[in-house]
Image (cartoon, helix red, strand yellow):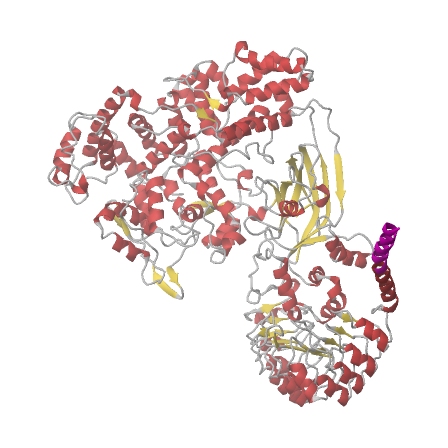
Amino acid sequence: MHRISLGLFGAAALVFAVPVARAGEWDKLVSEHCLDCHDDATRKGKLSLESLGKTIRADNAAMWLKALEQVERGAMPPSDKAELSAAERHAAVLDLEAQLVAHAESNAPAQQPTVLRRLNRVEYRKTIRDLLNLDLETSDPTRDFPEDTRVHGFATHGGKLVTSGFLLRQYLNAAEDVVSRAVHFEPRPEVRRWELLPPFVNKDPGYQLSEAAYLRKKTGGTPPYQDILERADGAPKAGYYPVDDLREGVPVSGWYLIRIRAEGKFRYADMDLKKFRFPPLSDPANPLRLSLFSGSLLGMDPSNKDSIRTAARGQQAGERELATWDLPDDGPAWLECRVWLDRGHFPKMVFPNGPTGSNNRILSYVTDNKYTLLGKEQLEEYEREVTPAAGDGLHLFFFETPRIRLYNIHVEGPLNEFWPPASHVAVFGERGYEAGDAPAILRAFAEKAWRRPVSSAEVESFVQLVKEAEAQGQSRETSIQKGLKAVLCSPQFLYREETPSALKGHEIAARLSYFLWSSMPDEALLKRAAAGELARPEVRRAEAARLLADQRSDVFVEEFLNGWLDLKKLGSMAPHPYQFGIYYSENLEPAMRAETRLFFKHLLRTNGPVAHLLDSDYSFINQGLAKLYGIAPAVLEAGRNGPVDGLEPGDLAFAAAGHAPSLGFARVSLGDPRRGGLLGQGSVLTLTANGVDTSPVIRGIWVLERLLGAPPSPPPADVPKVEPDIRGASTIREQLEKHRESAACKSCHRQIDPPGFALENFDPIGRWRAHYMKGEKPLPIDATGRFGEEDFKDIVGFKKGLVANQERVARSIVEHLLLCALGRELNVTDRPHIRRILEGAAPGGYRLRELVLLCAESELLCRK
Amino acid sequence: MRRNAMKRIKIRRLLLPALVFSLGVHALAIAAPDPAKLVELTVEQAEVLVAKKGRLSLPGLTWLSAESAAVLARHEGELELNGLTELSGAAAAGLSKHAAVPGFARSDLYLNGIRHLSVQAAEALAAHKGCVSLHGLESLDSLPLATKIAAQWGEVRLGVTTLTPDVAAELARSRGVSEDRSRPGVVIRRGDKAASILRFDRLTSLGKEVAQALAGADGVLVLNGLERLEAGAAEQLSLRKGTLVLNGIKELSVETAAALSAFPGELVLKALPSLPSGGAAALARHKGRLYLTGLKSLTEADRQVLGKHPNLVLPREIGFSQ
């Protein structure tokens, strides 16, 4: 475990021992430390604090705030000028902050309260899930919604969550969709059973005439098995194997039991890397795997065979991985999963770690190397059986290449233990829907959907809608569904209502639940809201702790990291497939994302210190990441023993269902101090590169913006970009040093470059590299730099500097937490609240869960 | 009247071509023999068959007259006559006029059933301008035919049971390249980039001189017919580069193993069930990829010794792999 310097906390406590702003401290600082450079005569950086005026006004408030931030972060006064003690600095900051807050509060309209906030896509989906008790994993009702605009990485900014005519139409479609999936007046559907024999896929004449015909000839009956030889590959991926007999999809949504009898064959096949023009992507050290995905051809024109084939045989938008298994090598075994399939969806099989994405490549390899791959008798049999007339498909029967061998597929369902299903009961209760129930049903439904108490009068128009439908001759069951859909399309559902100034209890409840669950408040939270208890900070804290302990808070980890670290960007700049083949062969993108989420979740659940985010001696990795990081398999295996504090065993399993221990994650001790913390994780290092090369500037800006909460100003328009040196004559450091010769560039790059240089030993996917390679020529990497007042030699030294500045990182986290929770830009009046949160967290060493709970406790959460 | 006459003329105009077409189709259906069922070929039948372009396969044909051969030679496309077990000099002369297939083909004239060729027949075939496939040929004495085969595209595969050093040396000149007939001057290399492939499945013994002659071929040399290999021949084979496939060898002397260990390329011994005493140490000195996937057992000492081989493929059940 990482040891935190207690001395630092002592220093932090000393800093915060100046609780009250003392007038005159800022003026003193300015006159003693700033005017040498920033008076009217010198105007260094074209800034004169002398002419800015001492009184805070609308026209100078922003500039004074900027000055305050510079001083607060230690960027000003420069270190080569007179020494400024921490206490002096803090006192001055408090003084100016008090003046700025006073000015802002006296000019209230200039502030930016949270505007009416629409549910974003994630919130809509999670709310529908909880409101209707529906499993939405295989069919996302928001799949056609436009992407939400993100501000500071978060899709929660009320001002940017705009609505369009297109989105309104999508709301109508989504309401139609989810109500029809939730409400079931029909009798319990019959359980159907499909017991399928080979061939399962490619039941077209070509296959029948070659492989299947050959197997029939050999066995005298049905082909005993079907092989999958190629991996799903490409972007979008191709090489999916749909179960042809189920292409129309299951007739009814529900839970289905899928059983597949299969084995992995020829995992250790002789695939000589040097001979294979396309190096095999499978690794004999890993078991062969079979994955199941859900697919659907609903809404497609059946006469358009090309597009049907492409959709069935390839990756589809919104597809879901149903299960993954490690396959046994020694004979077939039954693999089983119980998965939710929506009507019209069917299972598609995938060979995720097959040798290559092209059967032709395998064919070319085996036929070119038949004399070394086949013994004498095998060669004779091969040449006897495989004639030009028999077709190319036959070749591969005679060679040993890694493959999945499928024997049986059984599908059974829908398996409804209860009827009507839970979604129906969520709306109509156990008693069911009877004549005259519409007003009560609609009111109860609206109360849940609108997340607040609802009067009869408020739902009267919805009741009328139901009555009118009935009067027009529609059935009672159809008519009530109209009312339910109308509730889901109402502004009260789609927008989060918040009272100006102090929020009401249920509004605070919604703030808490959308902050930590991206969903509606549960019954317990609403109960506390109704009792008026949520105005009390300790109650909010207790409720936030309860919400965080629930698995539903996984979405908070996901969304917070998407926003704070920009993790959503991972994969948007795909690494070069030839230079970084391991990224694809080991499916590293989801693994990298999972590592960072597990690391953060573990820290959150165990209330670990922020310092661990910056440097740690452990992480959560799987086989692929172990390879990337150069960690021995034995270290990974050792990490698999025993439970991990704060995490469920399911958290460490990589696959949704099935059984694929080879993909699983483990907490491992990192022997190498260079790797620990976020800055050693593949996710961060890949998302801060462009897929081909690294840039200290991009990585440096990321560190400043995300970790240190101090984004640099954008470059002046007249400054040229740093172009990569394609001749390879100079290193990026040499180029940046030249760039910094310009005074306009120097002030920012002095801050930006050092963190970027510190990360230069990590290549664009996070592998350690000792030097750059420009063609055949190795160029040295210089990872030294200066951070704050300290020089560092490499990433290890830089991380020490970061840990020493952990309060800046804690502030950045708090600011991002509030951006996420409040849905608005932060302003100067938030600063005292943020400081109080940090003061509360400092004595404990800025522990992560504590920061979240302090945000929940903060008065900011109760104010619009 | 006039309108009726015009109508009759119109009907005749329509009916006549239809009638002619129908009769033509009928005649063709009667005349065209089924190539797969033919065991003899008359000149008339040959004339009908060569009217169609593309691959013409006559697998049941066991004998061919010189006249029919002359007609078949006019066929535009590959000629597959793998049922022929013998070929007269005159018939060979006829077939030798067969034009190479335009564009690109693995072979133009398939005569894989022929086991023996007279000197005249061999020399006649040597004059053929395309690729002749003679997989079943058990003896080859004709240097011109050997020269022609070595110059052909793709692998050299013969059923020869013996080879003379002269013929072996000639065949070893094969480089596995071919000129693209659709692009004169453009040379096509084999897909697997092997310098050449020489394959003699029925060669059961190999003298030192023939081995020395074959050493000139640097590609893949397949000698699956050999069950034994003397050290002297092995020494000669080891002078070559590429791949040496000896998948018929079930016994190996230490001396032969030692000689083969000097072979710098890929050595394939898939039929070898066990190693002689000292064989492991000898083979461990081999530097290329070594396939011993037929081994049924291995002593622990041999395992240790072979473990030093940098590029060894063993069966998984008896130990380490690759």
Res B41 seen here:
no
Magenta region includes residue A166: no
Residue plotted at (74% across, 86% down): B124
Decide which of B48, A13 is in the foreground and name it: B48
Q: Percent x, y for residue A391? A: 72, 61
User: Considering only vertical position in the picture, is A265 above or below A423?
Assistant: below
**What secondary structure prevails in the magenta region?**
helix
Q: Percent x, y for residue A763? A: 41, 54
**Quadrant of image for the C terminus of chain A:** top left
**Quadrant of image for the N terminus of chain A:** top left
Q: Percent x, y for residue A680? A: 40, 48
Taking the view exactly as shown, the residue that stands out farthest to the front is B2
Residue plotted at (53% across, 9% down): A457
Decide which of B15, A161 is in the foreground and name it: B15
Looking at the image, residue B205 sits to the left or right of residue B304; the answer is right
Q: Percent x, y for residue A671? A: 42, 51
Q: What stretch is highlighted in magenta?
A: B1-16
